[in-house]
Image (spheres, helix red, strand yellow):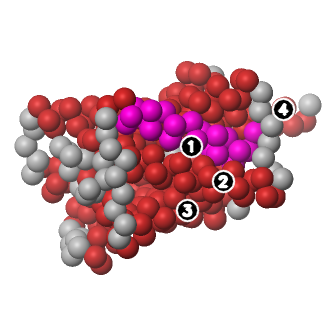
Amino acid sequence: MNLFLYLLTVLIWGTTWIALKLQLGVVAIPVSIVYRFGLAALVLFVMLLLSRRLQPMNRRGHLICLAQGLCLFCLNFMCFLTASQWVPSGLVAVVFSTATLWNALNARVFFKQKIARNVLMGGALGLLGLGLLFWPELSGHSAGPHTILGLGLALLGTLFFSAGNLLSSLQQKAGLKPLTTNAWGMLYGAVMLATYCLVQGIPFAMEWNTRYIGSLLYLVIPGSVIGFTAYLTLVGRMGPERAAYCTVLFPLVALNVSAYAEGYHWSAPALLGLVAVMAGNVLVFRKPRAALRPTSARLA
């Protein structure tokens, strides 16, 4: 089941970049995010109410959902999409893939969880692989004030994403399932961002064409309802640090789609990077061998 959820998340989030690209145009970025998560929350609530699977939550649960909505369905997307205006997408992907290490470190700080050596080694190897994959883009991009600002926003968005992971893990430990917490979190995130748009005077425009509506529906159903539910279920089942390795793998899917749709050409460093990422994947999911007990202990 874990492998299915993992591959599903990688496949979906590795292709949502196409839909995000098609969203750029008349509709402002924050408004598109409001549409996405507002509709996703509506779909989840209808599903849960019809199936009678909506779990009751106390005040603490709603407060955590409020924080999760702010981190996972609002601020992180604002940071990433704004950073993409000044920083190449490959550079943003490299920064975002550090979620594996941030999740491990944050779980250690806040949950006192021990960081497995294979998780750190696998995450580092995955980052090295991504660096090789995007080396031509990284080496050819001149640094400037906007570059530094974009990198800072990408890192901030990754930290918000990691915080949302830990909040979801906290909710699942309390017995609340991702479907319920996602529904409330997406609703809270959409409401907060819609309030921001109203205060800033950002118009709620809409493009009534196949390109925008089709991309919006893809982001709502597979990208949000299915993708976030699968991913956060993995967070509860595997832990934040292992689940976050999806963020290292889904750029590879995006590159393969780009090779088909935009003529991306695989280079030698990119292929070496692919090998490093896959090796890191094996390390992250390898179960540590149990230490052999001394003979005296066994005899005792």
Q: Are marks 1 and 2 in contact (CB under 8 Å)?
A: yes
Q: Earlier in the sequence, mark 2 or mark 4?
A: 2
Q: Percent x, y for residue 114? A: 61, 29
The amino acid type found where label 2 is placed reads Leu
How far apart marks 1 and 4 lie (CA) works out to 56 Å
The residue that appears at 50% across and 41% down in the rendered structure is: 190
Query: Counting other residues with Cα less than 10 Å from the Cα at mark 1, is it few (<14), some (14-19), or many (20 or more)?
Result: many
Tag of residue 221? 3
For disc 4, the marked residue is 296
Question: Which type of secondary structure does the marked residue at label 2 adopt?
Answer: helix
Residue 55, image x and y in percent?
Answer: 80, 42
Mark 3 to mark 4 CA distance (whole Å)? 58 Å
* Residue 133, quarter of the rendered image: bottom left
Res 186 label: 1
* Quadrant, the C terminus: top right
Residue 109 appears in the picture as rendered = yes
Q: Which mark is residue 44?
A: 2
Could you tell which of marks 3 and 2 lies nearer the N-terminus? Answer: 2
Quick check: is 28 in the magenta stretch?
no
Say few, some or many: other residues with alpha carbon within 10 Å of mark 2 (under 14 / 14 to 19 / 20 or more). many
